[in-house]
Amino acid sequence: VHVPLDTFAQLKRYRPDVVISAEMGMRTLLAAFYRRFHRRSRLIIWAEVSEATERGRGVLRHLLRVILSRQADAFLAVGASGARYVRGLGGRAKVFPLFYTTNVKRFSESELARPAQRAHRLLYAGQLIGRKGLAPFLDALAKWAAGHPTRSVEFTIVGGGPLRTALETFAVPANVALRFAGRVLYEELPGIYSEAGLFVLPTLADTWGVVVNEALAAGLPVLGSTRAQAVEELIEDGENGWTFDPAKPEEIYSAIDRAMNASCDELDTMRGKARARALALTPDKVAGWIDAAIVTVVRAG
């Protein structure tokens, strides 16, 4: 918990027309105080939350957010789940939806089709921590592989974290090859995506998940958890990926089964849809949504 005591003084010195505050903590509370004493200013709260990430938050934090929701002129809410969360706080501020993205063009420079030998090659990129849901996914993958002994499964895991040792020693059948690439430079990621066939994001709770944007741009259908808003917003089940609730092992297994049994032709069709979805969500488009929120609150004053 950080209390930036100089926030009010900095705002008073800068005299902003609009304040965008992203933490919904003490800094945002101080920005709300500034808004009350400077009536011509406006406060937009950037709500980087989802219903999954906010489960189990304490009562005091919830009460603080209820107060903030009544002081804000608008919210920038990440995804539909984030919008539902902030509307549930009871304030009357206008809620503007916001998606995250990245420079997706750099991930779209590889060939779209994949040869048969890597059409079903799995890839995960991210932190190796419990919240990412890799252990439940590997458990379901191991069960699937055990039931399909004639199929070879390759799964490359990129990233680092405290669970690496446990994941490296995870018991999987002989027909599953787990490869740990460790941490890599961001500039190397497009090449790594181009060597895979399918992307995996089994997270238990993520506000967004920009790796989904990257994977789609690279032409990878996504095996994704519905507890990541990038999956909820960008993945159409059976069209450009497969979705599942990570708390339901049978759903994870079903998604794996459908992905691994998709033909190369079916996957190539999905790859085209995946890339088109990613390229439609550009940084300029997202910036336009932020600009629209700013213009709206200024004109409302």
Image: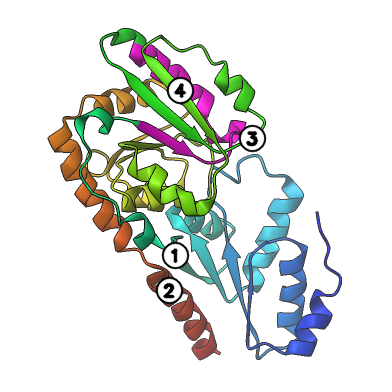
Please name whichever residue, 231 or 179, is drawn nearer the observer in this view of the structure.
Answer: 179
Residues at circles 2 and 4 in contact by the CB criterion of under 8 Å: no
Residues at circles 1 and 4 in contact by the CB criterion of under 8 Å: no
The answer to whether residue 51 is left or right of residue 268 is right
Query: Mark 3 or 4 closer to N-term?
Result: 3
| Mark 2 Cα shell of 10 Å, populated few (<14), some (14-19), many (≥20) | some
Please identify the quarter of the rendering in which residue 105 is found. bottom left
Q: Residue furthest left?
A: 265
User: Which residue corresponds to mark 2?
Assistant: 289
Query: Mark 2 or 3 closer to N-term?
Result: 3
User: Which residue corresponds to mark 4?
Assistant: 178
Q: Amino acid at mark 2?
A: Trp
Indicate the position of residue 78 as horizontal and vertical percent values: 49, 59
Nearer to us: label 3 or label 4: 4
Residues at circles 1 and 2 in contact by the CB criterion of under 8 Å: yes
User: Which residue corresponds to mark 1?
Assistant: 97
Q: Amino acid at mark 3?
A: Gly
Nearer to us: label 2 or label 3: 3
Q: Residue at x 27, y 45 (%)?
A: 236
Nearer to us: label 1 or label 4: 4
Q: Secondary structure at mark 1?
A: strand
Indicate the position of residue 247 as horizontal and vertical percent values: 48, 27
Please identify the quarter of the rendering in which residue 256 is found. top left
Query: What is the spatial separation of the Cα atoms under label 1 and label 3, in whole angstroms?
Result: 32 Å
User: Which residue corresponds to mark 3?
Assistant: 161
State the extent of the magenta-drawn residues as a range. 122-145
